[in-house]
Amino acid sequence: MAQDQENFRDSIGTINEDGKRAWVFPKKPSGKFYQYRKLVSYFLLTFLVAAPFIKINGNQFLMFNVLERRFNIFGFPFWPQDFHLFVISMIIGVVFIALFTVAFGRIFCGWMCPQTIFLEMVFRRIEYWIDGDRGAQMKLDRQAWNAEKIRKRVLKWTIFFIISFLIANVFLAYLIGSDRLMNYINDGPLEHVSTLVSLLIFTLVFYFIFAWFREQVCIIACPYGRMQGVLLDNKSIIVAYDHKRGEAENGRKKWRKNEDREALGHGDCIDCNQCVNVCPTNIDIRNGTQLECVNCTACIDECDTIMEKVNLPKGLIRYTSEDEIVKKEKFKFTPRLKGYSAVLVILTGILVGMLFLRNDLEANILRLPGQLYEHKEGNIISNVYTFKLVNKTTKDVEDVSFKLLSHKGDIELVRHENFVVPAQEMAEGTLFIEINNAALDGDKTKLKIGVFSGDEKIETTTARFLAPRSYN
C-alpha cells in the first residue's frame, strides 16, 4: 500500500499525539462531485424539513411518536397493534443499507446521512462564510481574543444556535406530530412549559453536535462505520486511492516541472497533501480504506483538480474497488449481493402483502378476566366481554355495531347500542353475548363476530365462549 507502516490505524484522525481533540479545519471542497452532493443534499434537506408537514389521506408523511407508540411511514399509520409491520419495515431498511454498503461502501454517510448533510452543507458553509477557508480558520483559531475574533465567534455561534433551534422544532414535529406542534406554537410557550424545556434540550444537543462534536459522531458514536468494516470486501465500490498508479516502483514524489516521473519510477501522486487537507475527518485516503472515511468524495474532486494542473490523468482517487485497482476486475453482481437482494425482495413482498391485508379498523374482543358464564332462563348462556376498536383512518367510523356470524344469538352492548369510533382513536367498552346452549359445540366454543358500520361489514374477529360442560 501507500505506506509500509500502518501505525495510522492505532489512533483516529481527530486525536493528537497527546490524546487530546485535534480540531479539523477542512479546506472548502469544490468540484464535480461536490456540486452533485449539493444538489442531493438540498433536495434531502427540503425533504427532511417538509416531511412532517406533508399529509397523505390525512396522515402525516413521516412521524415517530414513541411515547404514544404511533408511527407514520410514507403516509401509512402504524399503531401498537401493527408493531410487527413496523419491525419488518425497520429490518428492510437495515438490509437495504447493508446491501448498499456491500456494493458501494459508506456512500450513505457521505451523500444521504442527515448528520453529514447538516454539518457539511449548512454549518460548515456558514463557517466558511464567516471565518474563511482552511488557512483563515487556522489563523483565527490561533489569534488572540480581539474584537475581530469575538465578533466572528459570537456571530457564528448565534447563527448555529438559531439553526439548531429550528432543527429541534422539525425534530419535535416528527415526534409529536406537526399539527400538535403548530397548536403549541399558537398557544404560546408558557402554555406548554414542559414541551419548551424538551425543545431547548434538543436545541442544545444539536448545537453540541454541529458546533463542537461534529465529525466525531461519524467516527466514534455512529455504529455504521463499524458495520462497514464487517460488510466491505475487495469487490465493494468505495472512494479509493489507486496505489498502483500513485506509487509505482519508487513511491510518490513532489512535483517538479519537466521531470520524467515515469522514467524515474515515481507514481502520479505528487504528495501535495490536498486530499488530506480537504478531508472532513482528517484522514489520508492514500493509507487505504479506513473507518473514518465517509465516502464524501471531497478528496476525489481535490485530487482531480491537482492532476489537471500538472497535466496528469484524473482518477488517481476515484470510485473503485480494490480488485479493480489490483486485478483490473470490473464490478460484478456477486453471490453475496444476490443473497442480500433476495432477502430484501422477500421481506418487501411480505410487508406489501401485510399492508394490503391490514384492515383500517382493528377489533379485539376478549372475555372479561375472572368472569364465568351466566346460565339464564330458556337454556341461554351469557358471557361478558370487553372490546377495543382501533380506527386507523382519518375519518370517523359511524353507527358501529356487532353481530354473531357463526352462531345464532344476541350481542348486547353496555350503556349504548350503535356508537362512533373517532378518526385515529380507540373505542372500548363492554358487551354480553347470549347463545342457546343447544347451539354450542362444547365448553369452549369459538365464535366469529362481525363488526359493522351501518349495514357494511368492516371487520371480522373471533372470541372464545365459555359454557357448562354438563350441557354438551
Image (spheres, rainbow, N blue to C red):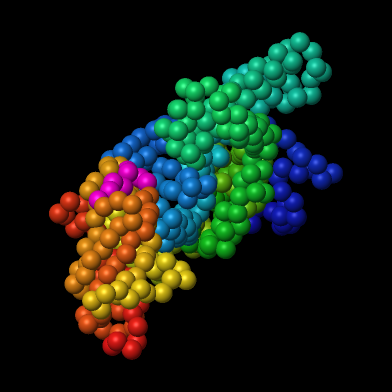
Tell me if residue 423 is in the magenta stretch. Answer: yes
Q: Is residue 217 above or below residue 382?
A: above
In the rendered image, residue 143, in percent from the top left (x then y), is placed at 79, 20
Q: In this view of the protein, which residue sits in the foreground, 472 or 7?
A: 472
Towards the viewer: 39 or 467: 467
Q: Main SS of the magenta segment?
A: loop
Give the image location of residue 120, x and y in percent.
56, 33
Spot the residue most to the right.
18
Determine the residue positioned at 52% across, 36% down. Answer: 171
69 to 441, vertically: above or below = above
Residue 343: x, y in percent? 39, 67
State whether residue 90 is above or below residue 40: below
Q: Measured along the vertical axis of the image, is residue 150 above or below residue 351?
A: above
Image quarter in which the C terminus is found: bottom left
The foreground one among 412 and 161 is 412
Residue at image location 26% in from the left, 63% down from the top: 411
Apparent side of residue 458 relative to residue 183 in the rendered image (left or right): left
Residue 320 image point, x, y percent: 48, 53
Residue most toward the front? 377
- Considering every residue shown, the one lying at the far left of the view is 455
Please name the residue shown 45% across and 27% down the image.
Answer: 183
User: Does the rendering let one see residue 416?
Assistant: yes
Quarter location, residue 137: top right
Q: Give the residues in magenta.
A: 418-425
Q: Is residue 362 magenta?
A: no
Residue, x 56% and y 29% (percent of image)? 192
Q: Visible in this render: residue 316?
A: no
Which residue is farthest top? 147
* Count of marks overlaid on the render: 0
Give whichever of 316, 350 is nearer the camera. 350
Q: Is residue 252 left or right of residue 42?
A: right
On-image quarter of the N terminus: bottom right
